[in-house]
Image: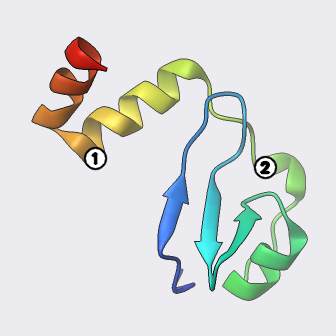
């Protein structure tokens, strides 16, 4: 899905959010689904659990994740 997003915001307990042209769009927002050409029932998108958020952060940040956990 190509949306031209500059940022992806991941927060435990909330669906992922994309920044597109300085505007934030939640993945469960019908407008973002339309922009992406998705035809999915909104109940498909669930908030990220703390474990999901941590796992995704580790995958993206690699070794920097450990540094952030230690030093904040």
Query: Which quadrant holds residue 31?
Result: bottom right
Give the residue drawn at x 70%, y 45%.
15
Give the residue drawn at x 63%, y 33%.
48
Write down the residue under mark 2: 44
Depicted 40 relative to depicted 67: above or below: below
Depicted 6 relative to depicted 25: above or below: below
Depicted 14 relative to depicted 5: above or below: above
Sort mark 1 into few (<14), some (14-19) or many (20+) by Cα contacts within 10 Å.
few
Q: Secondary structure at mark 1?
A: helix
- Residue 66 point in image, percent of width and height: 18, 22
Write down the residue under mark 1: 60
- Residue 49 point in image, percent of width and height: 61, 24
- Residue 60 point in image, percent of width and height: 28, 47
Viewer-proximal residue among 27 and 19? 19
Depicted 55 relative to depicted 71: above or below: below
Q: Is residue 62 left or right of residue 46?
A: left
Q: Secondary structure at mark 2?
A: helix
Give the residue drawn at x 81%, y 57%.
28
Mark 2–mark 1 contact, CB under 8 Å? no
Give the residue drawn at x 39%, y 38%.
56
């Amino acid at each position: 899905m190509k949306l031209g997003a500059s940022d992806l915001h991941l927060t435990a307990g909330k669906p992922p959010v994309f920044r597109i042209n300085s505007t934030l769009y939640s993945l469960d927002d019908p407008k973002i689904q339309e922009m992406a050409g998705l035809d999915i029932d909104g109940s498909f998108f669930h908030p990220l659990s703390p474990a999901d958020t941590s796992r995704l952060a580790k995958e993206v940040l690699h070794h920097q994740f450990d540094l952030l956990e230690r030093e904040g």
